[in-house]
Amino acid sequence: MLLAFTAAASSRKAAGDSVLGAVVSPTPGTHWTDYKGVAIGATTDAVRQKLGNPKEKGDDQDLYVFSENESAQFYYDAAHTVTAIMITYSGDIKSAPTAMQVVGEDAAPRPDGGISKMVRFPKAGYWIAYNRSGGDDVVITIAIQKI
């Protein structure tokens, strides 16, 4: 399965954004700006038009299940715009993105294989966190949230 995302290619340093952790990316500044074409600030209607009917629909959040291995929740504010996106990959995670693809930097794994990386993009108005659990039943969660 192909993961649809858009990368921003501006330098975080030049943009005034900060990084939590060491910088080891061969292409610094390349990170997700949206998930499947939906970005922070999109309207509820735009999300549903782009992705179809959610499995669970609500005024403050929608749940989409794209496969048995990939799902996403979109959180809305009172104005019905996206304030956060939480993506989960579990089971067969071969199609899941890497920390480098999501936050624009590699993250060193812990001894158990787990990975955690968070990067703030204040000028863009959001932060992104990449978490991969350790052990045999790996779960990857990606959060994009309005600052």
Image (cartoon, grey):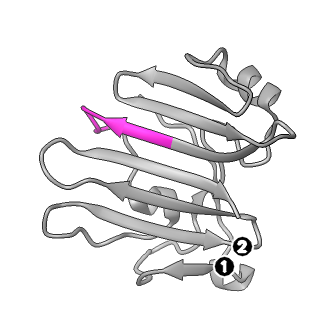
Q: Residue 109, how many percent across, how many down?
A: 24, 68
Whether 88 is among the magenta residues is yes
Compared with residue 77, is residue 60 higher up or lower down, i.e. above or below? Answer: above
Quarter holding residue 64 = top right
Tags 2 and 1 touching, CB below 8 Å:
yes
Q: Residue 62, how many percent across, how many down?
A: 63, 28
Q: Residue 142, how many percent across, how many down?
A: 47, 50
Q: Amino acid at mark 2?
A: Pro
Range of magenta residues = 87-94
Q: Residue 94, how many percent across, how many down?
A: 28, 38
Disc ID at residue 122: 2
Secondary-structure class at tag 1: loop
The numbered mark, 2 or 1, whose residue comes first in the sequence reads 1
Compared with residue 118, is residue 76 higher up or lower down, i.e. above or below? Answer: above
Q: Amino acid at mark 1?
A: Asp
Q: List the residue tagged with mark 1.
A: 17
Secondary-structure class at tag 2: loop
Compared with residue 77, is residue 102 higher up or lower down, i.e. above or below? Answer: below
Residue drawn at x 75%, y 66% is 124
Q: Quadrant of the N terminus?
A: top left
How many neighbours does mark 2 have within 10 angstroms: few (below 14), some (14-19), or many (20 or more)?
A: some
Q: Quadrant of the C terminus?
A: bottom right
Residue closer to the observer: 108 or 6 = 108
Disc ID at residue 83: none
Whether 31 is among the magenta residues is no
Quarter holding residue 21 = bottom left
Direction from residue 119 to residue 77 in the image, left or right: right
Residue drawn at x 65%, y 14% is 53
